[in-house]
Image (spheres, rainbow, N blue to C red):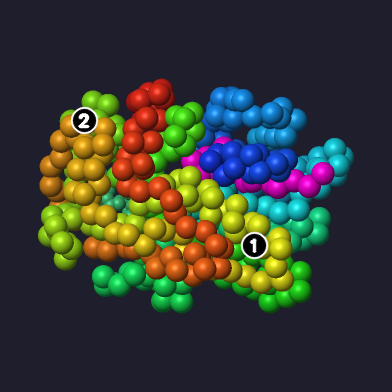
């Protein structure tokens, strides 16, 4: 039986991807330290998959462990051999992702993201598993103008988080150079994933206070905060607020399945692909759509620009569309409706 190892599979994007892997018939190993997620994943996946004709407990091995610890990773591969579920590929989500935190704690970010990935690659090599899909980020780019970002545009991150992602991409390039006929690698540069699976069991459930715009909007809508602070009303955009490429987390998860499928059926190579919608949405447009779709008020106030922000960060997604035969299917209204549905059904992290 062939299996996939999903590091960080209990997190926001990982959990949605695990759902699709299970639906596609894969057995999965999930290695997660739960530093930014919880062990309730199996329950959430079970509820989402109710009615499917397979026993989820037979298909998932959820292991608490840290990629900073090589032994934790090796134990998963040993288990896979013992129970004869060979790991044929890894989808590597495990990582710390807060830009602001990475500026305060750069060593923690370098150790977790880069050293953790080196451990993972060493163990993969040892066990001859050389297929990997890696979570990269739009944070690797040097963003300057209103132009859509292409994969071959200049990279020059402005924070430690973005640097860890670019460094991992570079490590992966070196790895394939050393064994060009063996590795199949996809670096997927995500733009701004939001929303949740439509049933409302899986969603973004961090253990600490999120700083991204979408969780702020849902918290204001819940009444936790009085208003959203919009960082800047004088950006060179059509309404003065920052423009981003929001992508539904289910579309992103589908992109991973397509990338995995492509890698496993093609020649050894490294792919670098943007996963975004190619559509720009301003902060005001996002808030207005959320209010309209969910019929709820989200008060906001304008503040000064946030340091390190850009006016416009939007993907050119044509390469991913053509290579992977994938395209985002859900629109901004779907993202706002599904994200709010999840927040309403899961108020437990309300204190974050
Ligand atoms: P998340 O925090 O919800 O998920 C990451 C998971 O990794 C969590 O479950 C966390 O507990 C786990 N983890 C972290 N460090 C670990 C370690 N050392 N060992 C084992 N597990 C560990 O984040 P997400 O939004 O699902 O992001 C997944 C990946 O995608 C991350 O690598 C992130 O950097 C990247 N990414 C996210 C975004 C975004 O906006 N959400 C955008 C671009 C890239
Ligand atoms: C979006 C817009 C803000 C909060 C970050 C990372 C990126 C990726 C996604 C991981 C901007 C504005 C925000 C608020 C606001 N993550 N905003 N008030 O900064 O585009 O991207 O998360 O890889 O790498 O950099 O996302 O959601 O923080 O901001 O006005 O309270 O919302 O100025 O225009 P960002 P974000």
- Does residue 124 appear left or right of residue 111 in this picture? right
Q: Nearer the viewer, residue 345 or 81?
A: 345
- Does residue 53 appear left or right of residue 216 in this picture? right
User: Where in the figure is residue 93, as x and y percent of width and height?
Assistant: 56, 49
**Residue appearing at x 47%, y 58% in the figure:** 327
State which quadrant residue 106 falls in.
bottom left
Q: Nearer the viewer, residue 65 or 107?
A: 65
Q: Earlier in the sequence, mark 1 or mark 2?
A: 1
12 part of magenta stretch: yes
Which quadrant: the C terminus?
Answer: top left
Q: Residue 229: in sight, yes or no?
A: yes
26 part of magenta stretch: no
User: Where in the figure is residue 56, as x and y percent of width and height?
Assistant: 68, 29
- Checking the image for residue 296, the label placed there is 2
- Does residue 197 appear left or right of residue 3 in this picture? left
State which quadrant residue 270 falls in.
bottom right
Q: Which residues are magenta?
A: 1-14
- Does residue 3 appear left or right of residue 161 in this picture? right
State which quadrant residue 72 falls in.
top right
**Residue appearing at x 34%, y 70% in the figure:** 148
Residue 240 versus residue 16 in the image, above or below: below
Q: Nearer the viewer, residue 276 or 52?
A: 52
User: Where in the figure is residue 9, as x and y percent of width and height?
Assistant: 59, 41
Disc 2 is placed on an element classified as: loop
Residue 183 versus residue 286 in the image, above or below: below
């Amino acid at each position: 039986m062939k299996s996939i190892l999903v590091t960080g599979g209990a997190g926001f994007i990982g959990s949605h991807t695990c759902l699709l892997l299970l639906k596609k018939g894969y057995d999965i190993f999930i290695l997660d330290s739960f530093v930014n997620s919880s062990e309730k994943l199996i329950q959430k996946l079970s509820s989402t998959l109710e009615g499917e004709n397979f026993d989820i407990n037979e298909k998932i091995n959820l292991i608490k462990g840290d990629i900073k610890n090589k032994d934790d990773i090796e134990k998963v591969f040993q288990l896979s051999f013992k129970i004869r579920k060979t790991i044929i590929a890894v989808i590597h989500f495990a990582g710390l992702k807060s830009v602001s935190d990475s500026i305060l704690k750069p060593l923690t970010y370098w150790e977790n993201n880069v050293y953790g990935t080196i451990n993972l690659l060493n163990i993969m090599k040892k066990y001859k598993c050389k297929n990997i899909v890696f979570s990269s980020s739009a944070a690797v780019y040097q963003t300057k103008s209103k132009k859509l970002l292409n994969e071959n545009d200049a990279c020059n991150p402005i924070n430690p988080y973005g640097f860890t992602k670019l460094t991992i991409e570079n490590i992966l390039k070196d790895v394939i150079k050393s064994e060009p006929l063996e590795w199949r690698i996809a670096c997927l540069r995500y733009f701004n994933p939001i929303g949740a699976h439509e049933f409302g069991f899986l969603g973004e459930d961090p253990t600490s206070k999120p700083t991204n715009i979408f969780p702020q909007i849902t918290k204001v809508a819940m009444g936790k905060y009085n208003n959203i602070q919009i960082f800047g009303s004088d950006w060179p955009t059509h309404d003065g607020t920052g423009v981003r490429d929001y992508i539904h987390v289910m579309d992103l998860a589908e992109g991973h399945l397509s990338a995995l499928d492509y890698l496993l059926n093609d020649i050894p190579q490294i792919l670098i692909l943007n996963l975004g919608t190619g559509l720009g949405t301003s902060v005001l447009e996002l808030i207005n759509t959320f209010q309209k779709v969910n019929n709820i008020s989200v008060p906001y106030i304008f503040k000064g620009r946030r340091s390190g922000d850009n006016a416009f960060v939007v993907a050119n997604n044509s390469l991913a569309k053509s290579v992977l035969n994938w395209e985002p299917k859900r629109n901004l209204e779907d993202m706002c409706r599904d994200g709010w549905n999840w927040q309403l059904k899961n108020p437990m992290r309300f204190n974050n």
